Image (spheres, grey):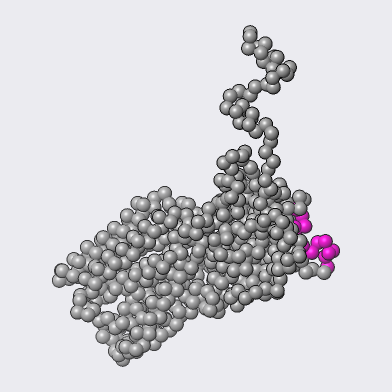
Amino acid sequence: MHPAISVIFFTVSSGAGFGLIFMIGLGVQLPESGLPAFLVSLLAGGLAVFGLISSTFHLGHPERAWRAFSQWQSSWLSREGVLAVATLAAFAIYALLWTFTGSRIAGLGYLISLLAAATVFATAMIYAQLKTVPNWHVWLTPAVYLAFSFVSGLILVGVLNVDSRILGIPVPWIVFFCLLGAWALKVAWWKRADQIGFSETGSDTGTATGLGSLGKVSLLERPHSGENYLTREMVHKIGRKHAMKLRVIAFISGCGIPMLLSAIAALSPAGALPMALAVLSLAIGLFTERWLFFAEAKHAVSLYY
Amino acid sequence: MTSLPASTEKKLGLVIDLDICVGCHACVVNCKEWNTGGYGAPLGDIDAYGSNPSGAWLNRIHTFEITPDDAPAQIVHFPKSCLHCDDAPCVTVCPTGASYKRSEDGIVLVDEDMCIGCGLCAWACPYGAREMDPVENVMKKCTLCVDRIYNENLEEIDRVPACVRTCPAEARHFGDFSDPESNVSKMVMDRGGIDLMPEMETSPVNKYLPPRPKSVPRTTEHQETDCKSDPAPVPGSFLNWVDQMLEKL
């Protein structure tokens, strides 16, 4: 699949924004009120909103994007839009109360956390629902999206308040173990993707043409000499060549380095800087991981090309 | 609504006879021609007369080679357009309601004024039946020539999809699959019509008729052995005499 930069940026940035909103909703220790609380809320909402705006750049008609709120009963993409707006609206109320009164309403917070998680789940389901892309069509896809969103939010909490604790455990240590858990899911996802090869449905050129029973079917000639929308969008093969190297880069940058830095942050007296560097490293790792998510995915229509 | 209808009154679609198609691309060209002037925005092209042309087409012909274990290889020209699936995955993913399947005749259409050009429907289709228009930035797909088949301004003979009307070999047929007595239903019954990628569970309406078994040429055995060495003239013939004379030189 063609890795569109706008969609990669959207899933990583919105994932982090909704992850941080999820953490705020749970009531993690952050600034009491006033400007610091406002800036934290702005960061969380900003990451989510910038991601969503970025996602409209890959639309043919962004001015009609509002229409995407209508089909929530059948479409995951529509559900994602509705949930994102609902989360952000509820979060805006929460953030205003937090900023001006210093009170963080627990019930509203939990609702926001639930909505944020549901939004990320819906984003992942846009991909996981597609039977045509076997790499994506698995429960591990939403699990990985949720895990990376969770860990992105957590690591941002670590930067904003390195001394905060959840259930008595310092956040940098929680980041340390959650990174491990999230990447374990991703490694399982990669392993499955390598094993299923082209398809788990058993699709091949034989089933695609319905001629498999007559012999070995292979493409002799494409319908046209140049590229078309389908070959550019779904038969995209560029990038698979260096896939293994990029996986290593994604893993080291997204897992190894931030784990090391969060351990340093947990053990040293001034932990905010290593946590900030960990965020940067995780961001590079996740952009690489998300690029591969698209670039490595093979679409059933490739069987005709 | 982008939910699928529980059932459709008719199931209009195509039968494509892979035994007959000669791969002339006339259906492809006539499809482009008709649909550039018909339903929705024109079918756009980029750099149409330049070195790297690219554009939206609703029907394309691929050519495949079948290599059986025990017979010579065979070439099959393979036209491919929207199959107007009963369980069309392209419809349910649409976030705007632009994509829909008509309950009256089962045709899958895109309301281009509502399409945001997100491309998700093209991702959901296993057959590559949908293409983004590079000029209008909306999704294009086969309409089964909805603006021809009911068009009373046309002669009755022309009230079929453009691809069917134009096919010089009659490899394409249009009809109602919900009627077991229709021309298309009978053809599918007689020839063992097939679904493309049934494992995708899309329940395609369009059916393909597989190539008929080839009669095996009587000389196959000779040809196979002969191919391995130099071709030898037939014993007793003039060429054989020349061959033997030349061997003696």
Q: Is residue B131 left or right of residue A15?
A: right
Residue A87 visible to the viewer = yes
Q: Is residue B125 above or below residue A146?
A: above
To which quarter of the image does residue B106 belong?
bottom right
Left-right relation of B212 to A294? right
- Give the x, y percent position of residue A280: 30, 65
Instruction: Please give the name of the residue rendered at 34% of the width and 78% of the height, measured from the top-left corner.
Output: A22
Residue displayed at 44% across by 60% down: A135
Closer-to-camera residue (A270/A200): A200
Quarter occupied by residue A281:
bottom left
Image point 18% across, 70% down: which residue? A266
Q: Which residues are magenta?
A: B153-167
Picture coordinates of residue B27, whole percent (x, y): 72, 54
Name the residue located 47 percent from the left edge and 58 percent from the top edge. Answer: A200
- Looking at the rendering, which quadrant does residue B4 occupy? bottom right
The furthest residue to the top: B249
Q: Left or right: where does residue A33 sit relative to residue B50?
A: left
Q: Tell me where residue A231 appears, x and y as whole percent.
A: 55, 54
Q: Nearest the camera: B123 or A31?
A: B123
Disc tally is 0
Which x, y percent locates residue A91?
Answer: 38, 83
